[in-house]
Amino acid sequence: MSLSTITTYLIFVFVLRASGQNTGTITGTVTDQADAAIANAQVTLSSPGEPAMKSLTDPFGEFRFGSLKSSSYRIYITMTGFQTRTIENVHSDGLSVSNLPPIVLDIAPVAPCPPLPPSRPDITNTEREEGEPSAIIGSVVDDQGEPIPNAAVTLTRPPRTTVVARKTTDAKGNFRFRNLPPGMYTLRASVHSRADFIVEGLTVRPNELTQISPSLVLHRCPPNAPCKPSYTLEIQVLCL
């Protein structure tokens, strides 16, 4: 590095410090034990005496906090189906970008699920079939709440591109995946001319019925604009 380059950098740093600007950045990626990205994990960044900042990981599991002053920070990560992860003493110099190594979340231990309510009008098709160890159920509707039949519903597991099961919704817009091995899944519902609906972090455990609630709403794509998918984290787990 030439002397002029070093001098220019030092002048730049001096000007930033003199102006009181905070330009520090902390970035990172959240993955599971199979090195698959975890989207929609909540990441909280805190520092003593400062308001906490929150962000959700993007579809690639990445997060970014900017405009940070020089300080030591604490990162707290939560995601449905995973154990909470805390990282202490993450330092920012208030000027440059700090890229953290991948942050791996462990799957949460199996916990007893609540008993199936004797009467729930919003829960349908919950009878356990003979030999069925676990299942995922849900429904797909349009913007007016009307059922969408023949919508494509797929389940993937890490790596994300591997499809493990496919279904189409019935005449009432319902779908059911049977006899699923325990693990983490991503569900995608799609139909022509409507935006996909994606459910991240579906945890399937033995002898549990996982209901996606409320219904997945597939909005009609706007004309001459990108058709962006929707997401949900509202998932009910019921004992079979």
Image (cartoon, rainbow, N blue to C red):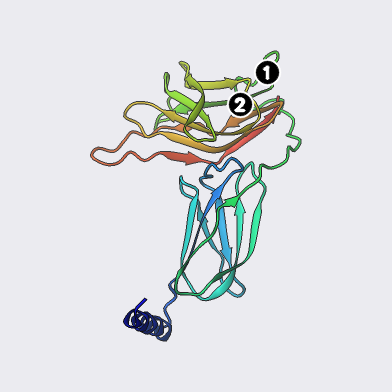
- The answer to which quarter of the image holds residue 128 is top right
Q: Residue at x 44, y 28 (%)?
A: 141
Please tell me whether residue 172 is drawn above or below residue 93 in the rendered image: above
**Could you tell whether 178 is left or right of 208 in the image?**
left
Q: Residue at x 33, y 33 (%)?
A: 220
Q: Which residue is mark 1?
A: 132
Please tell me whether residue 61 is drawn above or below residue 9 in the rendered image: above
Residue 202 in view in this figure: yes
- x and y, in percent, of residue 3 in the image: 35, 83
Q: Residue at x 67, y 47 (%)?
A: 83
Residue 147 in view in this figure: no
Q: Quadrant of the C terminus?
A: top right
Furthest residue toward right = 112
Q: Nearer the viewer, residue 111 or 194?
A: 111
Q: Report, in whole angstroms, how far the alpha carbon at label 1 lies from the one at label 2.
A: 18 Å
Residues packed near mark 1 inside 10 Å, few (<14), some (14 to 19) or many (20 plus): some
- Badge 2 amino acid: Ile
- x and y, in percent, of residue 87 in the image: 63, 60
Q: Nearer the viewer, residue 166 or 168?
A: 166
Question: Mark 2 and mark 1 in contact (Cβ < 8 Å)?
Answer: no
Furthest residue toward top = 130
**Could you tell whether 110 is left or right of 61 in the image?**
right
Mark before the other along the chain sequence, 1 or 2: 2
Q: Quadrant of the N terminus?
A: bottom left
Please tell me whether residue 222 is drawn above or below residue 189 in the rendered image: below
Nearest to the eye among marks 1 and 2: give it: 1
- Badge 1 amino acid: Glu
Q: Which residue is mark 2?
A: 123
Q: Residue at x 51, y 74 (%)?
A: 93
Element class at badge 2: loop
